[in-house]
Amino acid sequence: MELSWDLLHPVMSVPYLPTLGPLHPDAISAGLLDAIVSVSGSGEFLTHDKDRRWSERKDEHLLVDDMHQDRVRTLIPTLTGRGGLRVHLYGAPEHRPEAVEAAARLAIAHRATTARVVWFQSDPDPVAASTRVQLRTFDGPAPAVEGIEHLDALPEPVRTTFGAFADKLADEGFAFLHSRIESVGPVMTAVRDNRVVGAIGPLETMPDPIGKARLLPQYFGVLPEYRGLGLGRRLWRAAMHWGSTNGADYQLLQTTAGGASDRLCQAEGLTDLGFVCVMTV
């Protein structure tokens, strides 16, 4: 079926589209929605898709024949090549049981390995996993931060400790980043006791659907034994300095509600755009 922007837009409470994720509120449009539908299932990326830096083909696609839409709700299911099914619900909470039923049914029909329902609201959900979408605009200079260095600028003995750091924070994505480290943008690091104990990166920008430069999401973490020393805040501010000096207009982040990164971003004055809530069926 075809999706109607006129029906979707009134029930969209968070600027988020399936297969693309969070977007700048000004970048979401009927044309962008049509573009997502037009490439779905082809394996092609839209030019502004942040996932382009990690793969040659788009892994997630819309299940176009299984979409449903009316005046009060829109259900958009997606499926990944690894069998991950998601039903995105745009609409009021009373439509959630319908989304759960659709996810269970489609998981069987498409032999999905996992099935989840995704919905959007202004506050974190008391039960579902909730991530806050936050916007940081670069409308002024961000100061440089002392004591934070590019990974490539570290002395060789210290630089080689990044692998051990990445292994310890594998669950936060650093092992994957380490496997791609030669082909991505710079990584900023915090060093203590002659080893890497914190990092943020890669630092890269990409034009968004309306031509603004978006600072892409980074992997961000500090070893547990070095937390509480202010290193996370310094790494974050160093990344913002990089964005400011490299022409970024803004950055979008998703942070786990109530987590350390969430509290940091709130303290740094980012704009709260609402919550993405996910429940496994």
Image (tube, grey):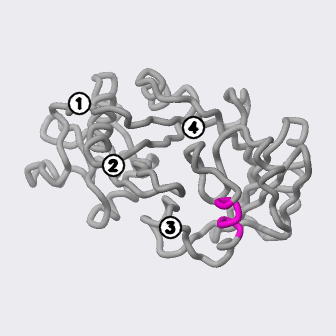
Residue pointed to by mark 4: 133
Work out whether 193 lies above or below 165: above
Three-letter amino acid code of the residue under disc 1: Pro
Q: How many marks?
A: 4
How far apart marks 4 and 2 lie (CA) works out to 19 Å
Mark closest to the chain's N terminus, 4 or 2: 4
Mark closest to the chain's N terminus, 4 or 1: 4
Question: Is label 2 in a helix, a strand or a loop?
Answer: strand
Residue pointed to by mark 3: 47
- Residues in magenta, as a range: 31-37
Three-letter amino acid code of the residue under disc 2: Gly
Which numbered dot is residue 143? 1
- How far from the left and from the top, in percent, is residue 240? 32, 38
Work out whether 219 lies above or below 120: below
| Residue drawn at x 10%, y 52% as measured from the top left | 157
How far apart marks 4 and 1 lie (CA) works out to 24 Å
Label 1: few (<14), some (14–19) or many (≥20) C-alpha neighbours in 10 Å: few
Residue pointed to by mark 2: 201
Residue 152 visible in rendering:
yes
How far apart marks 4 and 3 lie (CA) works out to 22 Å
Question: Would you say 249 lies left or right of 38 here?
Answer: left
- How far from the left and from the top, in percent, is residue 213? 41, 51
Label 4: few (<14), some (14–19) or many (≥20) C-alpha neighbours in 10 Å: many
Q: Do the residues under discs 1 and 2 have CB atoms within 8 angstroms?
A: no
Residue 281 visible in rendering:
no
The secondary structure making up most of the magenta span is: helix
